[in-house]
Amino acid sequence: MSSTEATAPKLVDDAVRGIGFVALSYLVFSLSDASMKWALPELGTAGAMIWRGLFGTLSVAFMAGVYRPGGLARIWPNNKRIIFWRGVLNVVATALYYVAWRHGLALGDTYAVAATAPLMLTLLAIPMLGETVGWRRWTSTGIGFLGVLFMFQPGGALWGLNTVLILAAVAMLAMTRIWTRVLARTDKPTTITFWLMFGQLPAGLLMLPFFPLPAEWPSLFALALVAMCGLAHGLAHYLLARGYAMAPVSTLAPLEYTPILWGTALGFLIWGDMPAWTTFAGAGVVVCAGLYNLHRERIRAREKRRREIQGEGKAAATPAPLAARTMA
């Protein structure tokens, strides 16, 4: 058996495991977000950031085995610059989500807006990863953003400042997704996740002058929810980092849409929210455009592999130079 044949099953297994990790992470994210949205009125925006950062940091530190010999060295980062800026973008995006939720944005609507993430990934991959985008993907991306405009039409269900906040947050999170893939080459998933969760502690403290804590101490139920949210969020970020380390971004991109299903179901069960038909229709256009971009990316990847194989075959079939043959 050739080395290529032996490696192929391993790559397939890694891709399947990566899909499983990322799919589970989005389910856990959705449950965590629902818990946090429920507890936000009692915690406040800055308080929610602090509590979630605390419990998330503790959960990841336990998973990383910081308490064992080696301690902090187990999660000390190699690519400190990207770790830092990824953490900054994440806390800003998280704060924008909290503000929008405090002002009544439904969970299903939040995830409908977040469906633009794969389109943004397509655009951000051009300057950040040096990828080229052909006319087909440019066209589908443009159609996808027409779906966004349909969702956000003036006077529509999603028209308002909350939607703008979520859209800005989604753009930041799309950038962190690309950085997650970059960091997977240099740092362990636990390292990537630990510093992301830890960064929410100082960020929450810095936010206190602008988002004071509520006058009353939160109930035990609210604290239990945020504790579960912090632990779950730490686990979800770990699963996400693990999945992106095992499978290509193009394989995992369609899973970005699964929170729409989870968020709509949870929003209806907990708060009785149901997105408007314009939201569903616009989100459908966005999802179709994103899936077409994924299809084109896979075709391009196949063509690139075919050219590489043909190039290797031609090189092997080319006879050696005359001088080299006479020396043999």
Image: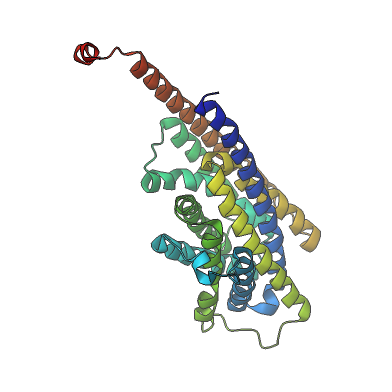
Total marks placed: 0
Q: Position of residue 316 (x, y in %)?
A: 36, 17
* Colouring: rainbow
Q: Position of residue 15 (x, y in %)?
A: 59, 39
Whether 320 is drawn above or below 54: the answer is above
**166 left or right of 263?**
left
**307 left or right of 68?**
left
**105 left or right of 146?**
right
Q: Residue furthest front?
A: 328
Whether 130 is drawn above or below 232: the answer is above
* Residue at figure coordinates x 63%, y 51% from the top left: 112
* Residue at figure coordinates x 51%, y 52% from the top left: 177
* Residue at figure coordinates x 59%, y 72% from the top left: 53
Between 184 and 281, the residue placed more toward the observer is: 184
Q: Quadrant of the N terminus?
A: top right
Q: Position of residue 245 (x, y in %)?
A: 53, 48
**108 left or right of 130?**
right
Q: Position of residue 113 (x, y in %)?
A: 59, 53
Between 96 and 156, the residue placed more toward the observer is: 96
Q: Residue furthest left?
A: 323
Q: Residue furthest bottom?
A: 215
Q: Quadrant of the C terminus?
A: top left
Whether 130 is drawn above or below 78: the answer is above
Between 187 and 218, the residue placed more toward the observer is: 187
Viewer can see residue 234? yes
Viewer can see residue 199? no
